[in-house]
Image: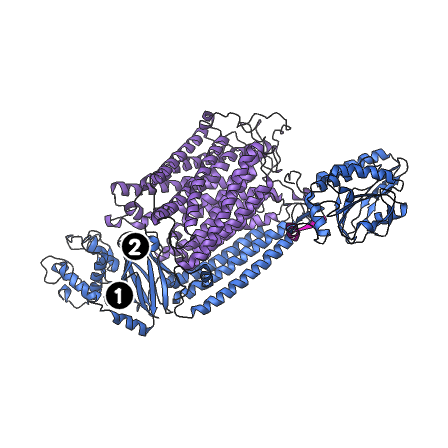
């Protein structure tokens, strides 16, 4: 645009040089193209057509939009440039002059004759070169009065210089609707075909042009500053904004519905080969919530969602607003000087810090609670291996890839792995804990809603990682009792441990009447043990586990390191049974002989 | 910056001698010119990007259905390992530093080359040697440990060519260290007269802090991988508990490198974004010093947060709390940067050309990526979200939404400087939109998947996750178009693009004072710097650019 404007300025200067000094500055200042948008052209003004026959200006209106140019046929340069601009631009249009729109050139010189108009018409229709173009291009001549009427209506202000017999005049073309209402101006001498096309389509009230043009016009608008069609950012924002609101509304409805559906006990979506429609119908954006801790986790999650949503929306809105307001060429004020404001930096840094610290504390408190199993939790032993979950209840009942739990009873899982790292993940409980080889980890939760929930392995563990899962069943007391009764549990974990303690020869040393001197294990669980290296260990599950499998790791003070390792001889499940037995051993001096 | 730099010669029809003149293979393979080494890296990482992208494509196709029916689980596990290893070490970490950094650093600070040009070439050979090991291990049958190489799986249980892959990363790591050293010395010793630290473009600050991390963190990765190889090959018990080792030690060592590595992958992107926003808003970066200090703060704090990858690993809960707190702290400087970039637009004179579109895309996606990081830093929430698709979505918003957007933005911004040619603006804008839209469609559903509880690295998944997975795969196909387009039109522009001239964007910065493509020695006379960076004046140029050649 800038280039275009400067060319015009240069041309004007050139024209003025040709005009000589006869026009005063004031007169020249009058030369202008005022934009009289939405005003009516004088359709009753009478002109002559190329044959000299009188014709109403309105004769060219009614059906099609009109591209109107004011010029005079003897003009030495500018008018020709305007007409050439029209020609160049319309030649690149898919729209046809005469079929889709009319091109009307009105001479501003009362002295122009139909003969000159005919010459001009022949020149341009030949160069336009489309069949039927004679019907599309009209070169009118007329008297001073109708010329004045038309010039004033469209805001075309020219000055006649009697000395050079030339006009000083602005350059540009006008697009009018079929009703004769002024719709668009294109100033200068180059009219981008895309913009011209959109202007014509718009002026036709969408009677011409393709669907694509109409869609384009929804998003592009005429910018009077630049005289071009540019992306209508506010319109885009409107669309995006309404879209977001709709999406949010859909989301909220979706959530509300999925919460209702979750009240039913068997809330699980159907599996396998269900058709896509069914999938969408059962598709929820929220995971099921089935433990007491889940509510606390979700609360933080939603708070974070709100905080982050606000920040994103704030930054996004600021960026969009600045992008629109301070786009190159916008009239917004831009005072000079360094903008940096230390106060602002301090404010947003400390505000961010405060909000972040608040979230940190909240999440840490909940995490602390998640990490501390209550004393009354029933203990279930879990052993993971590639690629299955094995669980054992205190009564000795074993399960594989399934876990049946009693509603509202806190459960503590004591877990270890036989091979690589696994992770016991129950999305509905919002808990997850890595399961490590040779190490006990603990996970606990209180199931609060009956149902069937996914158990996933969440730590990559090799080939069939994605199939290492199962189901958690949370049962009402009656159902739980039925499940318990379904199958004989066999011996309890403690009984199994006691049997192993004898069978594996533990009692040969760790008993009051043993021949080898080894520590007595009565009541050892959770007691401090003095070690040979001077430190003190607490005899927890991990300590007992390691003492069986890695006896050289921690040697009890005062005893010779003679214990053989049971690694490779005892599986993790057997070690767990032994530990269950050791835990059950009271401090009553009965020893391993029981 | 206005400088008393040598006046740019008026464009002439005859091509001036430039760094691209010698076409022999030998001249490329033995070059010590930082610009040519930058291009060597560009070609290499593009190839690696195609390898990693092909793996991602296969994964997304596989995940269209829940049953895991396209490839076997063994293949799938190898695919995500290839994707992770190649994208992290052979694309993202080298991307901006070695391509744009190598090309631009000396140009930006007014030097003729980096401090150690031959070491620079050696870095590329190390990188390629590492890449060769990695590619060999892929061709020979692949590795299925995931890019994280967690023990004891990687050291004891995994089949495949773990040691070859680890060797590749190990060797390429030395290339990283050498590049980092080279940049640090170059920035310290080779700035043009008058170029004080606070006159440096923020991209140089970003490269400096990145280099610090490269030099300090990469050795730890080398040690860790060497130990894994030692345990796997010789059976030294370091991580294997059955041999008296400790599994968690691996995770501590690995994340001590890999978390700072995240900042290796994002700091240079932040630097590029600063350059782009300043240029196309015609404004000095708002709070220049704060943005510069934020880079340093991120680099320092980034070393203290590795434990946030281990909240469910059975690490002490008190350690977890400290790591969580520090993770919240490290996100503050990132937030400061976002706010400052936004404020830079204020009172600018904004031209919406391709590089700015990428920069704005970066801003949006990085904001989402950064904020979702808070979910993962918050202890109780992380327990649910870690190892799910939420994590995948989060770090792809940072790595792909952030770093790759910035890399492409930078590539478009400096392409006229690199090649001397202009690319077709309309196609470029189109591809930026494709990438932004496709990216969001690919990765936003993964946030939802993660919250719903879909674990990562799953070859087959529960059927209720299918809708979101299909959306994600659909987005990936749009994203792919967005990535292929620049590949085509940038190549096209090499031959058919219009001549760019020395400074098509009317940008400040020394690199724009020399011809495009620059002469072999960068500058014909030593530039002298008298002003701060980004001496743009939005109030003077409230007109659309005359270089808006797209019209």
Residue A244 in the figure: left or right of residue B121: right
- The image shows residue B141 at horizontal and vertical percentages of 33, 41
B465 shown above or below B129: below
* Host chain of mark 1: A
Asked whether, in this view, residue A528 is left or right of residue A90, the answer is left
* Count of numbered badges drawn on the protein: 2
- Span shown in magenta: A212-225
Q: Chain of mark 2?
A: A
- Look at the image and say whether residue B235 sits in the magenta stretch: no
Q: Secondary structure at mark 2?
A: loop
User: Color of chain A here?
Assistant: blue
Q: Mark 1, residues whose alpha carbon is within 10 Å: few (<14), some, or many (≥20)? A: many
Compared with B62, B35 (above or below) is: above
Work out whether B383 lies above or below B545.
Answer: below
Rendered residue at 49%/64% (across/down): A254
Q: Report x, y in % for residue B304.
A: 41, 49
**Image coords of residue A525 (percent x, y):** 23, 63
Residue topped by disc 1: A393
- Residues B361 and A164: in front is A164
The residues tagged by marks 2 and 1 sit, at their Cα atoms, a distance apart of 20 Å
Say which residue appears at 51% left-offset and 60% top-offset. A306
How is this picture coloured?
A: by chain
Q: Of discs 2 and 1, which sits in the foreground?
A: 2
Alpha-carbon neighbours of circle 2 within 10 Å: few (<14), some, or many (≥20)?
Answer: some
Q: Are marks 2 and 1 in contact (CB under 8 Å)?
A: no
Q: Position of residue A130 (x, y in %)?
A: 73, 40
Please indicate whether residue B141 sits to the left or right of residue B118 in the image.
left
Tint applied to chain B in the drawing: purple
Front-most of B72 and B49?
B72
What residue does disc 2 label?
A: A387
The answer to which of marks 2 and 1 sits earlier in the sequence is 2
């Amino acid at each position: 645009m800038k280039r275009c404007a400067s060319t015009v300025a240069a041309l004007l200067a050139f024209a003025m040089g040709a005009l000589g000094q006869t026009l005063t500055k004031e007169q020249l200042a009058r030369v202008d193209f005022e934009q009289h948008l939405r005003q009516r052209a004088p359709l009753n003004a009478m002109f002559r057509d190329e044959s000299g026959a009188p014709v109403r200006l309105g004769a060219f209106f009614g059906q099609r939009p009109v591209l109107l140019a004011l010029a005079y046929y003897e003009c030495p340069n500018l008018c020709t440039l305007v007409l050439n601009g029209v020609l160049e631009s319309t030649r690149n249009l898919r729209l046809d002059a005469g079929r889709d729109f009319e091109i009307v050139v009105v001479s501003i010189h009362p002295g122009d004759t139909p003969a000159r108009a005919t010459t001009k018409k022949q020149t341009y229709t030949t160069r336009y070169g489309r069949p039927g173009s004679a019907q599309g291009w009209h070169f009118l001549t007329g008297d001073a009065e109708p010329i004045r009427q038309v010039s004033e209506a469209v805001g075309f202000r020219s000055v006649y210089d009697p000395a050079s017999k030339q006009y000083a005049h602005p350059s540009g073309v006008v697009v009018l609707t079929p009703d004769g209402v002024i719709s668009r101006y294109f100033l200068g001498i180059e009219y981008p075909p895309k913009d011209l096309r959109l202007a014509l389509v718009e002026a036709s009230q969408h009677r011409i042009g393709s669907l694509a043009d109409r869609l384009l016009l929804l998003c592009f608008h005429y910018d009077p500053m630049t005289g071009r069609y540019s992306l209508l950012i506010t319109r885009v924002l409107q669309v995006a904004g309404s879209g977001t609101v709709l999406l949010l509304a859909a989301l909220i409805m979706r959530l509300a519905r999925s919460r209702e559906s979750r009240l039913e006990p068997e809330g699980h979506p159907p599996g396998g080969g269900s058709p896509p429609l069914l999938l969408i119908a059962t598709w929820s954006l929220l995971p099921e919530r089935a433990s007491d801790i889940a509510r606390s986790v979700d609360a933080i999650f939603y708070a974070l969602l709100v905080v982050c949503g606000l920040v994103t929306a704030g930054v996004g809105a600021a960026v969009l607003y600045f992008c629109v307001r301070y786009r190159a060429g916008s009239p917004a004020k831009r005072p000079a000087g360094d903008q940096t404001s230390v106060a602002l930096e301090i404010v947003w840094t400390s505000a961010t810090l405060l909000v972040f610290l608040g979230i940190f504390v909240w999440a840490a408190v909940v995490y602390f609670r998640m990490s501390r199993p209550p004393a009354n939790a029933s203990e279930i032993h879990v052993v993971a291996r590639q690629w299955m979950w094995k669980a054992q209840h205190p009564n000795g009942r074993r399960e594989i890839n399934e876990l049946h739990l009693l509603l509202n009873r806190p459960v503590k899982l004591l877990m270890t792995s036989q091979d690589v790292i696994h992770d016991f993940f129950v999305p509905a409980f919002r808990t997850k804990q890595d399961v490590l080889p040779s190490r006990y980890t603990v996970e606990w939760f209180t199931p609060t809603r009956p149902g069937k929930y996914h158990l996933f392995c969440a730590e990559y563990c090799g080939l069939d990682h994605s199939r290492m899962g199962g189901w958690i069943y949370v049962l009402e007391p009656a159902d739980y009792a039925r499940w318990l009764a379904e199958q004989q549990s066999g011996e309890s974990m403690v009984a199994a441990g006691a049997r192993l303690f004898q069978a594996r020869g533990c009692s040969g040393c760790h008993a009051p009447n043993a021949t080898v001197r080894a520590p007595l294990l009565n009541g050892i669980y959770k007691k401090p043990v003095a070690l040979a290296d001077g430190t003190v260990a607490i005899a927890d599950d991990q300590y007992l586990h390691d003492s069986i499998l890695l006896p050289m790791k921690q040697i009890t003070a005062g005893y010779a390191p003679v214990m053989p390792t049971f690694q490779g001889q005892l599986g993790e499940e057997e070690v767990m049974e032994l530990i269950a037995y050791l835990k059950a051993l009271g401090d009553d001096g009965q020893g391993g002989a029981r | 910056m206005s400088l008393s730099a040598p006046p740019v010669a008026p464009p002439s029809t005859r091509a001036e001698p430039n760094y691209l003149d010698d076409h022999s293979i030998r001249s490329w393979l033995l070059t010590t010119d930082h610009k040519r080494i930058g291009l060597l890296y560009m070609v290499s990482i593009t190839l690696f990007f195609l390898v990693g992208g092909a793996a991602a494509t296969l994964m997304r196709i596989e995940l269209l259905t829940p049953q895991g029916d396209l490839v076997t689980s063994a293949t799938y596990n190898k695919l995500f390992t290839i994707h992770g290893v190649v994208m992290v070490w052979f694309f993202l970490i080298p991307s901006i530093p070695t391509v744009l950094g190598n090309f631009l650093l000396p140009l930006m600070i007014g030097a003729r080359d980096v401090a150690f040009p031959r070491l620079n070439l050696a870095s590329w050979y190390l990188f390629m040697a590492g890449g060769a090991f990695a590619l060999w291990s892929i061709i020979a049958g692949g590795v299925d440990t995931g890019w994280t190489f967690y023990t004891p799986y990687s050291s004891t249980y995994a089949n495949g060519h773990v040691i070859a892959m680890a060797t590749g990363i190990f060797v390429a790591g030395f290339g990283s260290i050498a590049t980092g050293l080279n940049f640090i010395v170059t920035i310290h010793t080779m700035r043009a007269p008058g170029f004080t630290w606070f006159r440096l473009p923020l991209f140089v600050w970003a490269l400096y802090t990145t280099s610090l991390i490269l030099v300090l963190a990469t050795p730890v990765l080398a040690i860790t991988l060497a130990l894994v190889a030692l345990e796997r090959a010789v059976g030294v018990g370091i991580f294997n508990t059955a041999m008296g080792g400790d599994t968690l030690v691996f995770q501590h060592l690995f994340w001590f490198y890999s978390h700072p590595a995240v900042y290796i992958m994002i700091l240079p992107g932040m630097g590029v974004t600063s350059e782009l926003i300043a240029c196309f808003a015609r404004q000095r970066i708002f709070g220049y010093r704060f943005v510069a200090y934020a880079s340093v703060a991120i680099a320092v704090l980034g070393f203290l947060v590795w434990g946030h990858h281990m909240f469910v690993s059975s690490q002490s809960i008190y350690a977890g709390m400290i790591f969580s707190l520090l993770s919240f702290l490290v996100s503050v400087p990132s937030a400061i940067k976002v706010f400052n970039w936004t404020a830079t637009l204020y009172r600018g004179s904004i031209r919406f050309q391709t590089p700015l579109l990428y920069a704005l895309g970066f801003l949006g996606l990085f904001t989402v990526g950064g904020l979702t990081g808070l979910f993962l830093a918050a202890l109780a929430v992380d327990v649910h979200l870690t190892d799910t698709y939420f994590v995948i979505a989060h770090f792809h918003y940072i790595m792909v939404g952030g770093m790759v957007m910035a890399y492409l933005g930078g590539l478009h911004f400096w392409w006229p400087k690199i090649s001397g040619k202009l690319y077709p603006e309309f196609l470029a804008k189109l591809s930026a939109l494709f990438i932004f839209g496709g990216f969001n469609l690919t990765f936003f559903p993964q946030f939802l998947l993660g919250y719903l509880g879909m674990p990562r690295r799953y070859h087959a998944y529960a059927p209720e996750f299918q809708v979101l997975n299909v959306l994600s795969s659909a987005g990936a196909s749009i994203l792919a178009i967005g990535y292929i387009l620049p590949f085509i039109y940038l190549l096209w522009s090499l031959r058919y693009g219009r001549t760019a001239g020395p400074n098509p964007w009317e940008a400040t910065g020394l690199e724009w004072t020399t011809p495009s493509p620059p002469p072999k020695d960068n500058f014909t006379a030593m530039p002298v710097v008298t002003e701060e960076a980004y001496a743009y004046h939005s109030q003077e140029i409230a007109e659309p650019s005359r270089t808006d050649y797209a019209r």
